[in-house]
Amino acid sequence: CRSILEGRSVNVAEIDAASNNGVDNIREIRDQVQYSPTEGKYRVYIIDEVHMLSIGAFNALLKTLEEPPSHVIFILATTEPQKVLPTEVNKIPITVLSRCQRYDFRRIGNNVIADQVSKLLKAEGVEADEDAVRYVAKAADGAMRDALSLLEQCISFYYGQRLTYEKVLDVLGAVDTQVFSKLLRLIIRCDVPGCVQLMDEISS
């Protein structure tokens, strides 16, 4: 486990199909799977964004998936599981899907993301308001990687300063939800001048 986390395990290989999607890339994997693992029981190949493989690459992979060596595990990851039509570009052939066990991962809850962001901020010695952390978690829309990316933007923009809700809104180009509530009330009252004034305040 430590060698995998440190990226020095020869038994675990991660391939980005977005940039390595040709037949030759899959043939190289097909040649490698014949060799037994140097340590442990298995050789693991993680193919990320597998829907980006070409039809030729899928056909080359299919031969290995039909009769895989007992010591090999393939993990095919995709953000586009709905792409299953073999006649179109960037689609996962049904012949490949039928040989896979499918596991769908739900988006991470805002509370979980907020807790992780808070722990990271504490570890890095960065002060932040709770509502700022909550907004970053909400803006990430269930993706931890996006939350960390947004957080990094906010910290970089206000380096050495306490991260507040207003600063997060400023960096992300967002508007406080209370502004939308105020705008809705103005619209209900048919207050056109008030709406125009509020829009001027938002854009300034």
Image (cartoon, rainbow, N blue to C red):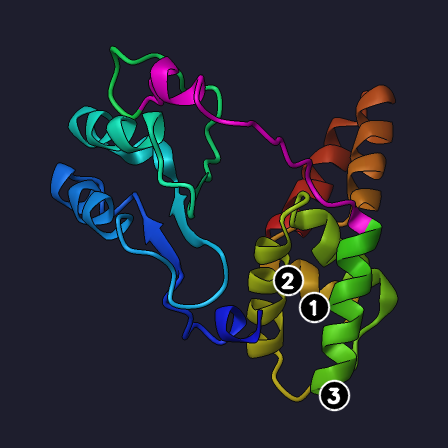
Up the image or down, 122 lies above or below 42; here it is: below
The amino acid type found where label 1 is placed reads Lys
Q: Quadrant of residue 88?
A: top left
Q: Main secondary structure of the magenta part?
A: loop
Q: What span is colored magenta in the figure?
A: 91-110
Camera-nearest residue between 32 and 59: 32
Is there any visible trace of residue 132 in the rendered image?
Answer: no
Residue underneath mark 3: 125
Asked which secondary structure carries label 3, the reply is loop
Query: What element does badge 2 sit on?
Result: helix
Mark 3 is on which residue type? Gly
Q: Position of residue 163 (x, y in %)?
A: 74, 75
User: What residue is shown with label 2?
Assistant: 170
Count residues near mark 2 (Cα–Cα under 10 Å), then give few for <14, some for 14-19, many for 20+: some
Q: Please report the residue visible at 87 percent of the width from the left and 22 percent of the height from the top.
A: 189
Q: Which mark is residue 167?
A: 1
Task: Tell me the CA gap for discs 3 and 1.
Answer: 18 Å
**Element assignment for label 1:** helix
Q: Position of residue 201 (x, y in %)?
A: 68, 51
Compare marks 2 and 3 and give the one earlier in the sequence.
3
* Position of residue 117 in the picture relative to residue 101 (left or right): right
